[in-house]
Amino acid sequence: MAIEVRIPTILRTYTDGAKQVEGTGSTLGELFTDLDRKHGGLRDRLVDDDGLRRFVNVYLNDEDVRFLAGLETPVKDGDTVTVLPAVAGGAG
Amino acid sequence: MLTITRELHDKIVAHARRDHPDEACGVLAGRAGGDRPERLIAMTNAERSPTFYRFDSGEQFRVWREMEDRDEEPVVIYHSHTATEAYPSRTDISYASEPGAHYVLVSTRDADTAEFRSYRIVDGTVAEEPVTVVE
């Protein structure tokens, strides 16, 4: 069972430069835990004590998982999960 | 150094003026590895705020996917400050997540002149760079 996970430039230090890695799990949360076993420290960049980090966008196929079930979102073989850091900022 | 056409420079300033007093934001895409902005993609500011901006997450996904399909990358990420100078704030610095991009800031605090400046922001360090506008 393999789920493809696309990694943004800024997180490729955790994946030895790979822009795509594979993982398993039946929910997004399990998938991130699985990825962290192979790419230590990656999970911490995606998840904090309150769940998915606020300024990291995670998509299951082409939907933002905030509109699905967050870390509880079910994932399955053949799915693609994409991580994109939010583009944000401002004067104040 | 940022090299940008007059046309794209003026489009960014026009976008900033149009969205004033909210912050405007967007991307200039260019061929991957080329470091030349080629086309402007104005993005919706999901915060719709005079002091904060955030790309709409669904829009960002589509735009990033389209750039990948076209073998492009985000060469410039721009946004405007509506009452302060065109210099990256602490928030701008902490959220800068594209180390290869030029971060352009425009200030619309003055109705008659637009400040247009560019920066590299890598690992929390800001370095201003000269802007060369070409015809």
Image (cartoon, rainbow, N blue to C red):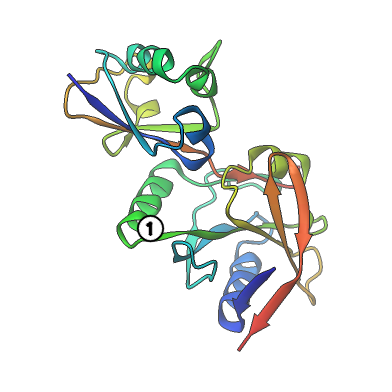
Quick one: B44 or B30, which is closer to the camera?
Answer: B30
Is residue B108 placed above or below B68 in the rendered structure? below
Which image quadrant for residue B102?
bottom right
The quarter of the image holding the C terminus of chain B is: bottom right
Q: Residue furthest front?
A: A16
**Quadrant of the rendered image containing residue A79:** top left
Q: Residue furthest bottom?
A: B135
Left or right: residue B66 compared with residue A42: left
Q: Is residue B88 visible?
A: no
Residue drawn at x 64%, y 39% is B95
| Residue closest to the eye, B127 or B89 | B127
Residue B86: percent from left, percent from top: 78, 59
Q: Secondary structure at mark 1?
A: helix
Which quadrant: the N terminus of chain B? Answer: bottom right
Residue under the point 63% across and 43% down: B96
Between B89 and B20, the one lying in front of the other is B89
Give me the residue at 27% from left, 13% from top. A25
Chain letter of the residue beneath label 1 in the structure image: B
User: Mark 1, residues whose alpha carbon is within 10 Å: few (<14), some, or many (≥20)?
Assistant: some
Closer to us: A32 or B58:
A32
Q: Is residue B13 left or right of residue A80?
A: right
Residue B36 in the image: x percent, y percent? Answer: 53, 71
Please provide percent x and percent y for residue B14.
61, 73
What residue does disc 1 label?
Answer: B67
